[in-house]
Amino acid sequence: MEGVDHLAHERKTAQFDVEAMKVVWAGSKHELDLSDRMARLVASDPVFRKDNRTMLDRKELFKNTLKKAAHAWKRMHELRLTEEEAGKMRFFIDEPAYVDLHWGMFVPAIKGQGTEEQQKKWLPLAYKMQIIGCYAQTELGHGSNVQGLETTATFDPNTDEFIIHSPTLTSSKWWPGGLGKVSTHAVVYARLITDGKDYGIHGFIVQLRSLDDHSPLPGITVGDIGDKFGSGAYNSMDNGVLRFDHVRIPRDQLLMRLSQVTREGKYVQSDVPRQLLYGTMVFVRQTIVADASRALSRASCIATRYSAVRRQFGAQDGGPETAVLDYKTQQNRLFPLIASAYAFRFVGEWLKSLYTDVTQRLQANDFSTLAEAHACTAGLKSLTTSVTADGIEECRKLCGGHGYLSSSGLPELFAVYIPACTYEGDNVVLLLQVARFLMKTVSQLTTGKKPVGTTAYMGNIEHLMQCRCAVKTADDWLNPCAIQEAFEARAVRMAVNCAQNVSKAPSQEEGFFSLSADLVEAAVAHCQLIVVTKFIEKVQRGNVGDGVKEQLQVLCNIYALNLLHKHLGDFLVTGTITPKQGALVSEQLRSLYSKLRPNAVALVDAFNYTDHYLGSVLGRYDGNVYPALYEQAWKDPLNESDVPDGYAEYLRPVLKQQVRLARL
């Protein structure tokens, strides 16, 4: 039980009010109470058991996921849960399933792109789950390049129908979650063709399966694309393949909020601005940023608790070994991940308010901040998901050999999370979109157009191109103004340098193509500045107790200075700081790690995750790691018998030297 004692001791050292920090992490007391209630509701229900998930074969896993989704739907009705409560319950069930795409993509697509009449027809069916939908955009041959999709929707004026068709193998829809075995309907993206003219990609509501026996409808070939990376993990989702063979649908199943086709086959744009579509994109990407903070906080919670329990080396004269968490190398790798989890949580909160602001502006036909908001959410989606995917893997390595066990929870968490780096926009492609926006912003500075939102700092370009960092001692790096100015100067200088180099190319497109790697780095610098700025603002305006505020300040400084240290080359090459000032960053980081060390376990406790949600024998709240590891090992199906299947046929002949050798 020594692990229990270790964590109990760690919690006694906390220098702040953990309950207050829980509220800060949750965002409000209401949100904390709601999460508490739903997490415990899920953890107490045996149907939502998940400790055996990695031991199930694909068919068993998928059937079990269907069972959980059906049980959750039943419980939501029995308990009369609100939409907010139901969403939180699905989150803590913690299993990728068809409901994710139904609620997360199918319903929002109809809301955003359907007319009022279409919404009245389809949304009640979707809300009652009398139909189950998915989002069929990506194809076998095209993902990020949506304009390159090949599926066609050709209007037939003789029957008042669209003919949905997959003209090539590469036009097969590929990857949509929920499509493989569950979805009855899909929002399908296809090239709208009428009167011989191609009007580009549009969304169509298409029924895929019979509502009587669930069999595919005529002309539709549909199935699952196969096993995916990792045990358990995303294999609970039926990602699908879909082909159409001249499937006919009524004309009014074209989502017609932005454009429509008349009975005669004439293509007509509505007076609703196309920019309204970006509002949905901003919403989806801000939820992805919020998910990144949850996944990274989960991994860092497991690694921190285990690092406090695990003892290795350092024993002298029979004394106790040293806690792994006390090693500076462990702190140097782990503490920035804890800080990043908090940083992503707070920038995710800010993105929620940005979405609200953008939505209100769009409804008033104000598009002035839309391009900046789109670039901002695209960049933050890319930044946070890449860091989180790498961070989960780092946490697995921080747990040593035991981190490789499925029972640690980390391999499955990694396998579940890494698709986020490619869905809703490949991360590198998104950064190139951000870079284009930055180049446009730089080019407009000479016209007197004032940059807005997260690019407002570029309005101070003359100062930022010339300023010199005033840091003289390591403690000067604790000044938020010094940190922010360094990040702003680096971002501006990298963007301006890219703009100058692009302008020297024979054409802008050739410049973008040849300098794409530099442009990606400039976009990353801009996105890191956003997160640093929002973290600093959170600390400065936080109405919390002194102990909590002090810890937030430590986390903020670790996040910013660790980034500065990792990207020291950028800061030095751009002349933002000197080598000596860079050395002072390392000195200050060592001091900050020492300040965080007594509070490390309490800071991850503030995430307020139940053992059921963490799903890790290494990250148990009570620290009773080794008995749990031992007990979990005996639950593996391979241990159901002492003598393995195949002994008589294959092992005994080897042991008894009875294997017949072929004569040459």
Image (cartoon, rainbow, N blue to C red):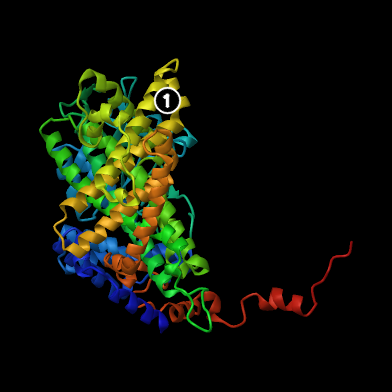
Residue placed under numbered mark 1 in the picture: 512
Give the residue at x 17% y 69%: 78
Place of residue 448 in the rendered image (x, y in percent of width and height, measured from the top left)? 20, 20
Instruction: Single out the residue that lies furthest toward the left.
Output: 364
Q: Quadrant of residue 607?
A: bottom left
The relative height of residue 49 versus residue 490 in the rendered view (above or below) is below
Front residue of this view, candidates 626 and 220: 626
Image spot of residue 300 (x, y percent): 37, 62
- Decide: is 90 above or below 449: below
Residue 267, image x and y in percent?
24, 23
Q: Nearer the viewer, residue 191 or 145?
A: 145
Residue placed most toward the observer, 353 or 454? 454
Residue 309 image-quadrant placement? bottom left
- Of the residues shown, which amino acid type is indicated by label 1? Phe
User: In what quadrant of the picture does the N terminus appear?
Assistant: bottom left
How many labels were placed on the picture?
A: 1
